[in-house]
Amino acid sequence: MATGERGESGRAAAPPKIAVIDLHKSFAGREVLRGVNLEVEAGESLVIVGGSGAGKSVLIKHLIGLITPERGHVIIDGEDLTNCEPARCLAIRRKFGMSFQEGALFDSMTVFENIAFPLRRHTRMDEAAIAARVQECLALVHLDGTGGKATSELSGGMRRRVGFARAISLQPEILLFDEPDTGLDPITSAVIDAVIVEMRKQLDVTMVTITHNMQSAFRIADRIAMLRNGQITAIARPDVFRSLADPYIQKFLAGEPLEEEVA
């Protein structure tokens, strides 16, 4: 539902948690985002899919303010992240938790220290409170008792879940997942997806995930958006997305070779 539309009751619908408006970004003269428009409702789990190099990671980094667009806006809870004072932008960004590809853990730290890091840096919690929060986060991702482990002792799936625990440590309102299943076997991927679904239910957060894994997308999404040629070309519920007539989408779902994207 677009911003400002009215529901069946006649009352104005709640504004989206995230609104992306006409977003443009280029690198070295190559247009990556060419006018992206997208809305994510509060409490929704949106999955963005697309071919390699389509700009999925670039888009998700715009959402959290890690990249500044050349044109367009990112609106979070009605506030423009692309046009605000630095202190206010920082406050908006603190609504986010992000899980990067393959966990992006600090290898010199234990599991506990990785999760405690943002708490020590961004809060005034004492060590007892930090320890309690770390244990809560580990329990949420089903890794109780692993706080003392070195990151080198972790499997790929465990690294992802420690990354999730760190992402939720500051109790964000929005969670971003950058390719959470990359490099994992199908069984581990299914476990990761189940944890993502459980986290959403328990934490009552809005989620945006980018992935190449369509099985994962169908498991965790309320809606799936296709990013192609720098624009959102389709967005629908998983059951509708499966049956879209677009030949590109059907080839993508079938894992068939795709025509070369326009540069």
Image (tube, helix red, strand yellow):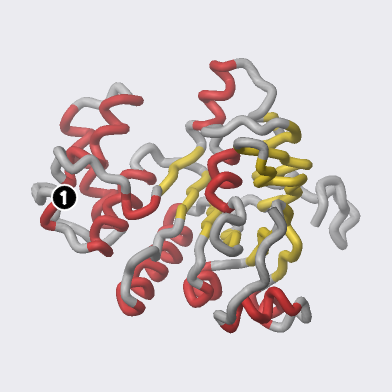
Measured as percent of width and height from the top left, residue 184 is found at: 32, 69
Residues 64 and 97: in front is 64
Q: Residue at x 42, y 62 (%)?
A: 196
x, y (%) of residue 199? 41, 59
Circle 1: residue type? Thr
Q: Which residue is mark 1?
A: 151
Q: Residue at x 32, y 75 (%)?
A: 185
Element under label 1? Answer: helix
The x, y position of residue 125, in whole percent, is 27, 26
Tell me, yes or no, if residue 76 can be seen here.
Answer: no
Give how far across and how far down residue 103 sits, in percent: 32, 51
Q: 146 or 217: which is nearer to us? A: 217
Residue 206 sits above or below residue 26 on the image: below
Residue at the image position 71 percent from the left and 43 percent from the top: 20
**Front one among 150 and 87:** 150
**Quadrant in the rendering for residue 253:** bottom right
Locate residue 149 relative to residue 251 in the image: left or right: left
Disc tally is 1
Q: In which quadrant of the rendered view does residue 118 lie?
A: top left
Q: Is residue 8 above or below residue 250?
A: above
Q: Is residue 234 visible?
A: yes
Where residue 49 sits, quadrant-wise, is: bottom right
Which residue occupies 18% across, 57% down?
144
Q: Label 1 neighbourhood size at 10 Å, few (<14), some (14-19), many (20+)? A: many
